[in-house]
């Protein structure tokens, strides 16, 4: 099932229909046993907490009303979790002498984890993502994003876009925050995918980039190609920190456009993940 955060309220989509849930987002997604809890809410529709929505009404709510599925959560990211990502990072950093660091991270027990965004800087489905004006090599990074609840349990999944300035990061690994963390450098959505168990490793991630409605990049990969286990990444993030509202964790990318490619204003990025849907954003400079 899927949860959507909209300007009008929180919408639950199940195989049996759509429901409006009258609860705050942070409280809702942090319920223990979220899948079973949502099943119960759907079964007691009309109780004052949950109201059935007609499919046509739900469609109107979701059209143009979607917010990023994040409330008071921080957004974090994991790096160099796929071999292709390791190779790309080594390529961009070879002139600065930093290439060996990425190889070491890929093989190390400890993953690379970094802070990505506060909630108010996250772009939703249909909103613009930004590229830096002081960068000449900008790319999107399509990623499976975990929602980890306040108890450290993976409770749901969404699509993440980890926008990155590869030339800034490649110039010096210490510039990583500037390459990764800026206004609208993260996008999440369209909703939160809640399953009874772990997401299948056969799940595919796809990305297409369009320029003037013509395709300039297309690729896909199964999340089984990730080197690290998803619960392992969640455990490392929560090892020495508490997140009272939970946290989102992007898990890394295996789809990296070639070194000759850079985003331009007006490009449209479409990232799809099986079961979750498609996240669509247009690239702009920050006004």
Image (tube, rainbow, N blue to C red):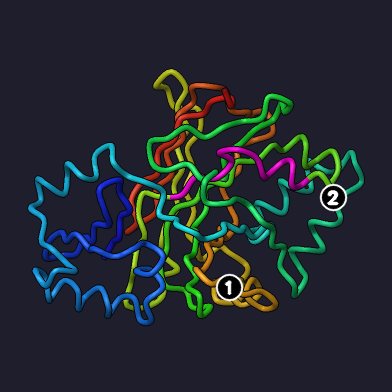
Q: Quadrant of residue 180?
A: top right
Q: Is residue 205 left or right of residue 118?
A: left
Q: Magenta span has 219? A: no
For residue 99, which numbered disc appears in the image?
2
- In the rendered image, residue 194, in percent from the top left (x then y), is placed at 34, 68
- In the rendered image, residue 189, in percent from the top left (x then y), is placed at 40, 50
Q: Is residue 101 left or right of residue 262?
A: right
Of labels 2 and 1, earlier in sequence is 2
* Other residues around mark 1 within 10 Å, as few (<14) / some (14–19) / many (≥20): many
For residue 234, which numbered disc appears in the image?
1
Q: Is residue 286 left or right of residue 105?
A: left
Span of residues in magenta = 176-188
User: For the point 24% across and 39% down, which residue is it?
Assistant: 63
Q: Which residue is more in the foreground, 48 or 28?
A: 48
Q: Is residue 211 above or below residue 146?
A: above
CA distance separating discs 2 and 1: 26 Å
Q: Nearer the viewer, mark 2 or mark 1?
A: 1
User: For the point 60% across and 50% down, which residue is it?
Assistant: 117
Q: Magenta span has 182? A: yes
- In the rendered image, residue 218, in percent from the top left (x then y), is placed at 47, 37
User: For the point 34% across and 63% down, which residue is it?
Assistant: 24
- Number of numbered discs present? 2
């Amino acid at each position: 099932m899927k949860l959507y955060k909209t300007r009008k309220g929180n919408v639950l989509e199940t195989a049996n229909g759509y429901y409006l849930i009258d609860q705050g987002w942070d409280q809702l997604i942090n319920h223990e046993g979220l899948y079973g809890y949502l099943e119960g809410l759907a079964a007691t529709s009309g109780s004052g907490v949950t109201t059935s929505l007609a499919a046509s009404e739900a469609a109107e709510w979701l059209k143009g009303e979607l917010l990023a599925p994040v409330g008071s959560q921080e957004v974090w990211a994991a790096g160099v979790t796929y071999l292709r990502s390791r190779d790309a990072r080594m390529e961009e950093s070879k002139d600065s002498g930093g290439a060996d660091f990425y190889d070491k991270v890929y093989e190390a027990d400890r993953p690379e984890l970094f802070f990505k965004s506060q909630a108010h800087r996250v772009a939703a489905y249909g909103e613009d993502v930004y590229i830096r004006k002081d960068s000449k090599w900008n790319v999107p990074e399509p990623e499976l994003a975990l929602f980890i609840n306040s108890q450290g349990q993976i409770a749901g999944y969404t699509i993440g876009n980890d926008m990155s300035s590869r030339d800034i990061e490649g110039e010096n690994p210490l510039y990583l925050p500037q390459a990764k963390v800026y206004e609208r450098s993260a996008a999440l959505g369209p909703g939160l995918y809640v399953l009874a168990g772990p997401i299948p490793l056969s799940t595919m991630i796809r990305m297409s980039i369009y320029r003037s409605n013509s395709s300039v990049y297309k690729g896909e990969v199964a999340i089984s190609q990730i080197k690290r286990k998803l619960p392992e990444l969640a455990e490392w993030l929560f090892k020495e920190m508490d997140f009272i509202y939970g946290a989102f964790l992007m898990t890394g990318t295996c789809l990296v456009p070639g070194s000759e490619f850079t985003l331009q204003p007006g490009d449209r990025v479409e990232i799809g993940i099986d079961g979750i849907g498609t996240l669509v954003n247009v690239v702009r400079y920050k006004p």
